[in-house]
Each structure stands twice: as C-alpha cells, then as structure tokens.
Amino acid sequence: MQTVYQQMETEELKAALAELEREVDETRAKGLALDMARGKPSPAQVAISRPMLDILNSDADLTDEGIDCSNYGCFEGIPSARRLAGEFIGVPPEQTIVLGSSSLNIMQSILIHYWEKGVPGYTPWSKLDHVKFLCPAPGYDRHFGITQDLGIENVPVRMTETGPDMDEVERLLAEDDSIKGMFCVPKYSNPTGVTYSDETVHRLAIMKAAPDFRIVWDNAYAVHDLTDEGDQLANIFDIAREAGNEDRILGVASTSKITFPGAGIAFFGSSPANVTEVASTLKVGLISANKLNQLMHTRFLPNLDAVRAHMRKHAEFLRPRFAAVERKLTEGLGGTGCATWTHPNGGYFVSFDGPEGSAKRIAALCADLGVKLTPAGATWPYGKDPHDTNIRIAPTYPSVEDLEAALDVLVLATKLVSAQLALEER
C-alpha cells in the first residue's frame, strides 16, 4: 500500500515536507526529554505492592509448612511458592523450582547447562559444529543476547497474528537437526502483543524436531491482561506430554512486573526429568534462593486468583496508556499508509511498523527531538531488521501526559521520514 506522500504530485509533496520540517523545528525547540525505551512499570504501579513489605517483620512467623525460611535448605523453593509457580507455568508443583528474582537468569543458566553438558544421552551443544536457535521476530532482544553470547546462531522466524510462522518453523526443523531450540513468549508476546493460537501451541508441542530440541516457554505476561476478558493460552505442557514430548518444554515466569521489578520471585517448570537434570547443575552453585522473599510473596499473593486480583489494579494504570497509544496513532497516522501497529489485549508493548527503510531514521529523529525509543532493529536477532520497519513502543512507564507528548513526536517523525522516502523515490 502506498503512503499518502507517495500519492502526491512532486510540488505538493515538497510543500508537505516543508510544513513537516517546520513542525520538527518547533518540536525541537521545546527541549523535550521523554523515555519510551524499556518496558518498566510506572512508579504508581510499583507502589501497589508496597503493603507486601509490611508482611515480614521481627515478630513474623518465618516458617512455611514446616520449612524454616530463615536458614539454609529447600533448594527447590518453599511449598507455597512451588504451588504458585505450578499455577503460573501450568505444571504440578513438584515439577517446579523457585529461584531468584530473574527469569532471564534462569533461561541463561539452563541454556548454559545444555551448552556444557548437553541433553542427557546427547552431545553437549558446545561440542557440535553448529548450533542454531529459532527466534520469533519481532521478538525480545534479551533472548537473542543469551544465545548470541554462547555462539549459537540466531535464526529469525517472522511472527504472525497467531504466533510464529509455523509452516516456516516446521520446514526449518524438518531439514536441519542443528536447530536445538526456540524462544517463545506465548502470551502477549514482546513486542507484538500476540497470544499464540491453540493451533500454534499444538503444532509446537507435536512437531518433528531434533531429539534434543528445546522450547524456552517464557510466559512473562501470563497474567498481564488489560481487561477481565484477556486472551487465553492453551497449556503446552499437557499437549507435549500426550505427544511424548514433555521434555521439550522449558517453562519460565516471574513476578517482576507484578510486584517489584528485579526483586520478585522467578519460576522454572518442566518435565520431572528436566527439573531433576537442571537442578543437578544449579545446586552446585546455590544452596537455596531467598526463601524470605518467597514467603513474603506467597503471603501477599497466595494463589493465582490473588495474583489476578492484584493485576486488575495494575490494569487500571495500563489501560489509559494503551488507549493513548491507539488514539494518538489513529489520529495522527490512520489512513495515511505510513504505519501499522498492533492492538494487544495485554502485556507491555505495542509493535509499530513504518514504511520499508524507515525505522532507524524515525528513531534517530525522535532522539533528536527528545524522545528515547528502543533502538530500531532491537526486535530482530543481531539488531538486523530485514526491512528496517519495526519499532517497539513501551507505553507503561511515562505518565499519560508524557506518553501522549512522546507519541506526537513519533507521529511527526514517521510522517517526515515517510515524506522524505517518497521524495527520494522520485
């Protein structure tokens, strides 16, 4: 589809460009300093969890079902935390481990485990000539960083409205046994906000792949619905177990965007064999995680119903921000052909696409005008967006007023770059 600027006669286009450049000069003079770069909860959201800090004091009972949380032991996590982990991930509590605050750290530790030791019965990945990982893209840059750091080749697979392009996933796996894994953010994916369809989940669980192939099932936004009618995600663990592939799925989640970012509790859940195997490595360097933090969390949020009630408070802050994104982009760019964007029902991001060859220029212009965005290209492995179109919008941290001002800049930058591209084509 052509942009409105491509449809203009040359003189009309030059006049439009001059007007846009004038608006840019006016905006630059405002000296803005706004940040839409990372998906962080706002200070008001974080404050929702402050009552949790009053739960443990010097007089508090520090035991959990007979476990002394003030001393060593209980590597796998305290019973109440493992039950909560099971509810989050979708497996029985005994198939979970509750660790520190970072699910990203869990993912890295598990992949290092397979890199150094391999899947039981198979060659360590580090001893193989070539190891590849599938990376749904646009996707999460920190996922890509873990495998890239190990020397694993990241292979992008384009995201669709129902999840990763499964025809492409199945084709690649059928012809290449060096593909040993895949990253998935299955609910409200980062950054598209897409929730995997039942068919996609089923195909991921049953598809043919190398016997030591693993899916990192990073359900970071499992409870991050904007409304009470949030997206529903099928339980991949049940499907994989029925297909004889229960070892394939490595589930992770955390409370980082539920309670305190960087100070929550993080969960790992998988098959009994995987949990035993991964624990054998993690136990070497960890006697037990912070059980007092686990205890504080589970007394504040004892089950998933309590978590969902807590998340409804978060949604009160998030809905106006996501509504502002939709309103500002529609008012400024609707019908122009200059951009498309996603319309998620939850999560933390909106995925924005400008014309081909525009994203880096748009991001640079926004930076010049005082608006910081996630770097263009970051949503693709190695920072290489093949068409240079995608920008991740992170609307959660700024105030609504600041967010609207930042979105006005994004709209203006998109229009100017689109007009410039149209003139350069002539």
Image (spheres, helix red, strand yellow):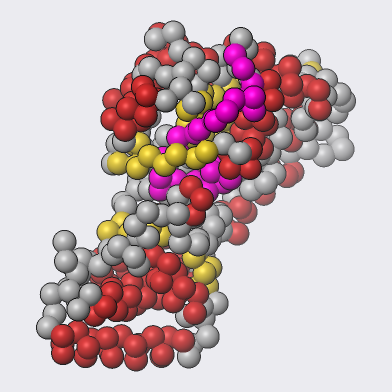
Residue closer to the observer: 63 or 153: 153
- Residue 133 belongs to magenta span: yes
In screen coordinates, is 410 left or right of 180? Answer: left
Q: Residue at x 74, y 24 (%)?
A: 282
Q: Residue at x 28, y 41 (%)?
A: 161
Q: What stretch is highlighted in magenta?
A: 122-145
Q: From this view, report whether residue 30 is shown above or below residue 349.
A: below
Residue 273 screen position, x and y as percent:
61, 10
- Residue 408 belongs to magenta span: no
Q: Residue at x 54, y 30 (%)?
A: 131
> Quick check: can you spot residue 401?
no
Residue 132 screen position, x and y as percent:
50, 33
> Quick check: can you spot residue 156?
yes
Quadrant location, the N terminus: bottom left
Residue 421 screen position, x and y as percent:
28, 74
Residue 46 screen position, x and y as percent:
61, 52
Q: Quadrant of residue 354?
A: bottom left
The residue at the far front in this view is 129
Q: Which residue is drawn at 40% across and 48% down?
A: 138
Quadrant location, the C terminus: bottom left
Q: From this view, report whether residue 415 is shown above or below residue 10.
A: above
Residue closer to the observer: 426 or 221: 426
Residue closer to the observer: 311 or 196: 196
In screen coordinates, is 143 left or right of 99? Answer: left
